[in-house]
Image (cartoon, rainbow, N blue to C red):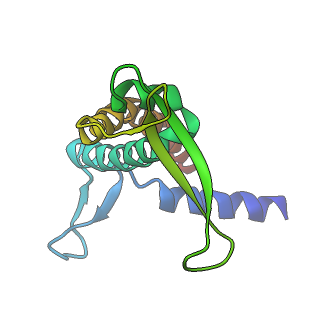
Amino acid sequence: MLAAVGIGARAMVARLCNWGSAVPSALGQAGRLMTTSRSVQLLILAVGAALLAFAAAATAPFHSPSLVERFQCPEGSTLRIQEYHASWTTPGQTGISIACVDALGTVLTSENETRGFWLLVAIYFLPSLAALMITAALFVALHRRLTMR
């Protein structure tokens, strides 16, 4: 039973981790194989990191509000995250309001909101890229180890 699980896991990892191994050519010739180039691998990692960075920046008010406040709120204001209950469409509907407010509680608008969001995306890009590169390296190492047997 355990041997079958090991073989199944080995096949799954071999399918998932095709980085740098032979894949069918775009020309469609059965006997001709090519390898995935490093530039394509880095492009895939960069796009994945950009998606993770965008998601992290979009959810930043919840996990790092002080960072959002620094880049999006005007000087002297604070970030306020507030849950509200709305009843105009569906009874019991809730939503979340995220706004910069001054000391008197007045909601402020900032010309830095869009620029601040893209700065957050840039800040989260490098850690996301590093995490994906480490994960890819671990998968490649695991693939090589399992296919050597």
> Which of these two is toward me, 63 or 9?
63
Residue 136 appearing in the image: no
Instruction: Give the quarter of the image for residue 96.
Output: bottom right
Q: Position of residue 148 (x, y in %)?
A: 54, 45
- Image point (54%, 50%), residue name: 147
Instruction: Give the quarter of the image for residue 109.
Output: top left
Q: Position of residue 26 (x, y in %)?
A: 18, 70
Q: Residue furthest top?
A: 76
> Which of these two is toward me, 46 or 7?
46
Q: Is residue 134 left or right of 121 when viewed as pictured?
A: right
- Image point (72%, 57%), residue name: 6
Say above or below: 130 vs 50. above
- Image point (50%, 39%), residue name: 61
Instruction: Give the quarter of the image for residue 95.
Output: bottom right
Q: Is residue 105 left or right of 32 when viewed as pictured?
A: right
Q: Is residue 108 left or right of 2 when viewed as pictured?
A: left
Q: Position of residue 32 (x, y in %)?
A: 21, 67
Q: Is residue 32 left or right of 74 when viewed as pictured?
A: left
Q: Position of residue 98 (x, y in %)?
A: 48, 45
Say above or below: 5 vs 81. below
Say above or below: 28 vs 56. below
Residue 114 appearing in the image: yes
> Which of these two is toward me, 66 or 36?
66
